[in-house]
Amino acid sequence: MNQTFLEYFRCPKQNAQFRAKDGLSQASGFFSFGPGVVGYGRYAGYAPADSPQGQLRDGLEDVECGSGLVCLPFNLAEVVENLHLERYTEDPQGGSSGNGIVARIYYALRPLFPVAFRRHLQRAYLSDWDKIAFPNWPVDHTVDSIMRGAMQLLLRTQQLDRIPFIWFWPGGASSAVTMTHDVETIAGRDFCQSLMNLNESFGIKASFQIIPEERYEVNEEFLESIRKRGFEVNVQDLNHDGRLYNDRSEFTRRAGKINEYGRRFGATGFRSAILYRRQEWYPDLDFSYDMSVPSSGHLEPQRGGCCTIMPYFVGKMLELPVTTTQDYSLFNYLRSFSVDLWKKQIDLILAQNGLVSFIVHPDYIMGDREMHVYQQLLTHLAWLRGQKNAWLATPGEIDRWWRQRSKMELVSDGGGWKVEGPGSERARIAYASEKNGTLVFTMQQLAASERSADTLKHP
């Protein structure tokens, strides 16, 4: 339990003092942890609910504190893992990930369907998206809310004014923002150079996820044209047929080919087609990071979501969750040609200092309306960098930072604190405190020649 909290906050080990109550229920279920925060796992003293809807037992009522120790009515590490790995879903490894009969029929016949008819079927399948009770939409940060609620309990129990921790992002950045481009057709591939020109005009680098087989020709000249401009190349699925996770043995076979393409492409990141995923199978993939799990998957064929806006490790692989609505969903499911939803999601994520990650396909933004929306988004992202101290980075840069941060230590330094470990020169120390029932983060004052960070408040 304590290690999960330490991995999130990177605070001194002596401050992370949690224990689960005895007598946890055999079955997992839903409970709350304060207003609007839903957890999933085994629970002590009460049977957790079968549904996230309705009246839920509030875990805050069953917390016991004493001698600096917070005793929770659930196992913090278990609950966080359950949410990350989507174990709360009715069928976490079944029909929604491509095994269902409907999905099999659809992908078998998909090549025969006109594009307009495919979009009609997709909209019909997703028509109930706004009735899904959990995760939250348009952004879900349940894991982050649970972690911050746990931090508040530590402050109260240990009677501390503040607890130091290693700030989430380098240089004291308020949040991280990353742009990714999934290339799905020949037309999209051929538009990549123009898209890079546009991105560069705003000073924004991105990653391009390339399908290795069947969709279009991939040669070294094309890959190098991306890499030499400072953009990143990643692998997207194998052939984008929607069947990657249908069968365990077939997945193992395909993963071997995917890994070989990763080495050939010089890629350290992976994304599956259509954001299908089974995170328990990730050990077969030989990549540093994955980008296939939405924070809240209401508008994805596979529902669910990892319920966080922060990176997290799944074994050796780092997951960079998709935290905003895809362009395809925005244009075709919601039929919106405005940046308003994206701006709303950005504001919600920045309020929690999380990762703002986008999927924008070169294939779907070549029209005048779509291109206008994308240009507005880039303008806003550039504004965030200048006015909100957001860190605009490629997925690979975020992966490298988060791995460095995961190995840093906060150590006492003559009455103060310092960060030790590779990359610590980019790290910043922050303090968590509670004011009027609200968790507040304050950055440690820097030298006069450096920028002093603002105080960041959290709902």
Image: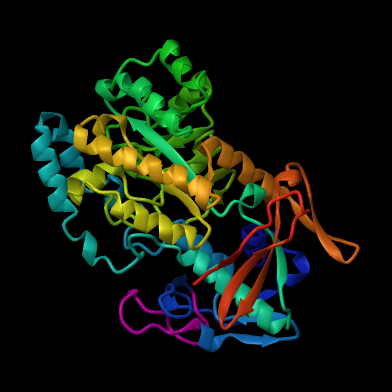
Question: Along the horizontal axis of the image, is 194 left or right of 336?
Answer: right
Q: Is residue 61 above or below residue 225?
A: below
Main SS of the magenta segment?
A: loop
The residue most toward the right is 414
Task: Give the quarter of the image for residue 114.
Answer: top left
User: Taking 440 as reference, is 258 above or below it?
Assistant: above
Q: Nearer the viewer, residue 445 or 89?
A: 445
Task: Using the rendered view, name the quadrant where residue 179 is placed.
Answer: top left
Q: What residue is shown at x 36% (from left), y 54% (from top)?
A: 343
Q: Residue at x 16, y 52 (%)?
A: 125
* Region in magenta: 42-59
- Is residue 54 highlighted in magenta? yes
Looking at the image, which residue is at 40% across and 46% down?
A: 380
Q: Nearer the viewer, residue 271 or 368?
A: 368
Residue 185 found in image quarter: top left
Q: Is residue 50 magenta?
A: yes
Report whether 72 appears left or right of 132. Answer: right
Q: Position of residue 255 (x, y in %)?
A: 44, 31
Q: Is residue 86 visible?
A: no
Horizontal and vertical percent position of residue 194: 34, 22
Is residue 11 visible in the rendered image? The answer is yes
Q: Residue furthest front?
A: 448
Residue 215 position (above or below residue 327): above
The residue drawn where x is 84% and y is 64% is 416
Q: Is residue 143 left or right of residue 444?
A: left
Quarter of the picture holding the N terminus: bottom right
- Residue 261 is situated, as x and y percent measured from the top left of the image, at 46, 22
Q: Position of residue 113 (x, y in %)?
A: 10, 33
Viewer-closest of 238 and 201 = 201
